[in-house]
Structures are given as C-alpha cells and as structure tokens.
Amino acid sequence: MTGRGRTVLSMLVVAAIVVGVVAVLVLGGKASGPQADDNGGNGGTGGGQPATTSPPPAECPLTGLKPEGGSVPNRPALAVKVENLPAARPQTGLSWADLVYEEPVEGGITRFIVVYQCKNASRIEPVRSARLTDPPILKQFGRPIFGYAGAVPAVVKAVRAAGITDVNFNIAPQAYHRDPSRQAPHNLYTSTDELYRAARRTGGIPPALFTYSTDVPAGAHAASSVHIPFSAYSDVFWRWDASKSQWLRFYGTTPATYSNGQQMAFRNVVVQMVRVKMTDITDANGMHSPLAITTGSGTVYVLRDGKVIKGTWSRPRQSDRTVLKDAQGNVIPLTPGPTWIELAPQRTQITVR
C-alpha cells in the first residue's frame, strides 16, 4: 500500500471509531439487544410486565371505593367457594369481600361465590366444592383465580375451559388447612394471601362489573326489607339499617353473623331473577345439581340507600358483563361499597316492603 493509501485508511478508521463513540453516548452507553434492557431485560419495566401498561384505576373496580392502601392492587379478582348449610355457619372472611354471589345448589340449600380484589382476608371458612353455575359468573372478571375444595370432573373441566386460574384444594393443598374446632367437611379454610401465592400471578386487574354513584336514581322507592325464600335452610331477609347505612342479613328473624359475632351487612343487595335447570350431576345423596343461567335477561331488584329500583338485568354472552337497567332503560348505579348478588330462581316469590 502507498503512503497516501495508508493515510486515507488511517483517517477512515479514526472516523469509524468516533462514530462508534458518539453512538454509544447517544444510546446511553449501553449496547442494544434484549440482554441489555433496563431493569432486567423485560421491556424496560422488570417483573415480566410490558413496557407500556395502563395506570391502575383510581377506584376499586368491584366496589367503586377508593382503595385503602392508596392504590388498587395490581392483581386479578380472586373467587372462593364458601358453604352455607346451617352446619357451616357462622362463616369467616366475607366481611372483606368486594362481591358475594348466593346461588341455589342441591336440596334447596345455597352456596356463596366470594370475590376479593381490593382487600385481603386472613381467613376464609368453610371452603367447599364448585358448581357448573360458577365458571360463567367468573368469566365477567377477565381471568380470575378460583379457590374451592374440589368438584366433579365436568365442573373442573368447565373451570379450566373458561380461562380461570384453578387453585382448588387438589391442586394447591398447601394453601388450605383444617380447623380442628369444626366438624369435617365444614372446616376447610384458606386466605387470600395463600391463594394468590398458589396462583403465582400478578397483573390482570378486573374490569368494573357495575356502575357506581352516590346519587340515588330518581325512580327509586323507599324500602325497608326484601325477602328471598330460597328454602327453609336459606330463608333470606335483608333489612335496611339507616343508622349504619347498610342492609343487614337475616335467616327469618335470626341475624346472619360471622364467626366473630358481627352481623353480615352490605351496602347494596342485587336480587337477580334467573332461570334454573337441573343437570345430570348429582351430589353424594343422589340429588341433582341445579344450574343457574346467568346469561340472557330477567327481572332485577336493586336495593341501595334504603330504596329499591326494579328493572331488568341483561347479559347476552358469557364474555359480557351483567348490565342493570331501570324501566326507562337507564343504567342503575349502585352506591359505592360491597355488593351482595342473590341469584334467585324465577319461581321465587320476592317480597319487598
């Protein structure tokens, strides 16, 4: 190579080095590539979360309340199946729930689907088995977590087909315990912390199910009680307590209480009249298991603030949420706070006074 050629080559090498240094400075002194991403190589946010995420809602999506900790927990809804035979009472843990569904099961008894998201429950008892009614209800919450004692194969299959994270007793036995002070099978208990750990999931804050407002709808009428006679085992009354601004639960004239003696009380009670059909599934006594159908439409009674609004509920598909509307077609807002949903068979004679 001539002297001039060597000089030109040297100038090109120097220029390339300068360009490389500038590029490194502009890029923050780091090489490109996934192994060099900020915060652990997960799109710049760490923890396996995407680089751009929506901010958490300002209010708890399932109650419309401001979260006690200042922000809504970044976690999915967690549902737990709780028993309601007289032998299973009093229950523990429902006072921390965002929502409770009461559904008819075999022999006129009822069971609860207790849904948590914004609060934790240190103890939930007694946990029992799931039913076919449960997966369609839970699909409204996106991809929730579901804790239960077990179920027949058809129910387990339906839970998993619905995209629900299954943490039942047979899958996550470490999350459940037996209460020696209670008789089996009414003594299985768990907690929200243990079930969330068993699910190993974060993210997935559920969408809001209902609309909330502190303003009482114009078409509301004064009401002091509602009677939902599921059966002699579950002869449910809710009575308005103006001093507490809550609906108190009774079985006949007997207060329904938690294990600490506190009476069950909720801000909203939604009585959703549903079709019920018997399935081929039977319990240990040979009684057929009912399926409450929560898609379609029907009559609804919404009780809030010592008033009742009668209207209709509608949910065309399982992927849709349940919408409550009054006689004029306006969406019925709930008052911010926990809500109890009664899935009452259409034949049930509802009495509102």
Image (tube, rainbow, N blue to C red):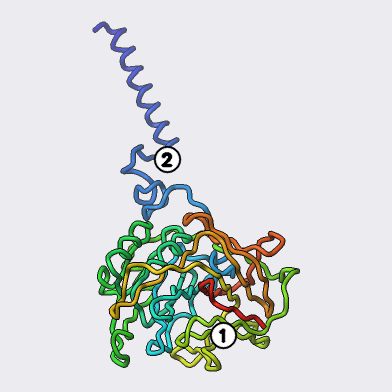
Question: Whole-Å distance between the Cαs marked 1 and 2?
Answer: 66 Å
Q: Quadrant of the N terminus?
A: top left
Residue found at x 28% / y 87%: 184
Q: Nearer the viewer, residue 179 or 283?
A: 283
Question: Earlier along the polypeptide chain: callout 1 or callout 2?
Answer: 2
Is 187 displayed left or right of 297 in the figure?
A: left
Q: Answer whether residue 9 is visible to the viewer in this image.
A: yes
Q: Is residue 58 visible?
A: no
**Hey, what amino acid is under mark 1?**
Phe
Q: Secondary structure at mark 1?
A: strand
Nearer to us in this view, 266 or 184: 184
Q: Is residue 243 left or right of residue 296?
A: right
User: Of tags 1 and 2, which is closer to the observer?
Assistant: 1
| Left-right relation of 144 to 68 | left
Which residue is identified by label 1?
237
- Label pair 1/2, CB-CB below 8 angstroms: no
Residue 305 image offset from top left, x and y in percent: 67, 78
Residue under the point 63% across and 76% down: 303
Characterize the local packing of mark 2: few (<14), some (14-19) or many (20 or more) Cα atoms within 10 angstroms: few
Q: Where is residue 323? Give x, y as percent.
A: 59, 61
Badge 1: residue crowd in 10 Å (few <14, some 14–19, many ≥20): many
- Residue at 53% across, 67% down: 62
Q: Secondary structure at mark 2?
A: loop
The residue at which mark 2 appears reads as: 28
Q: In x, y percent, where is residue 340?
A: 54, 75
Quarter of the rendering occupied by the C terminus: bottom right
Residue 15 placement (x, y as % from top left): 38, 21
Per the rendering, the mark at residue 264 is none
Which residue is pictured at 37% across the width and 55% down the height? 47
Amino acid type of the residue that numbered disc 2 sits on in the rendered structure: Gly
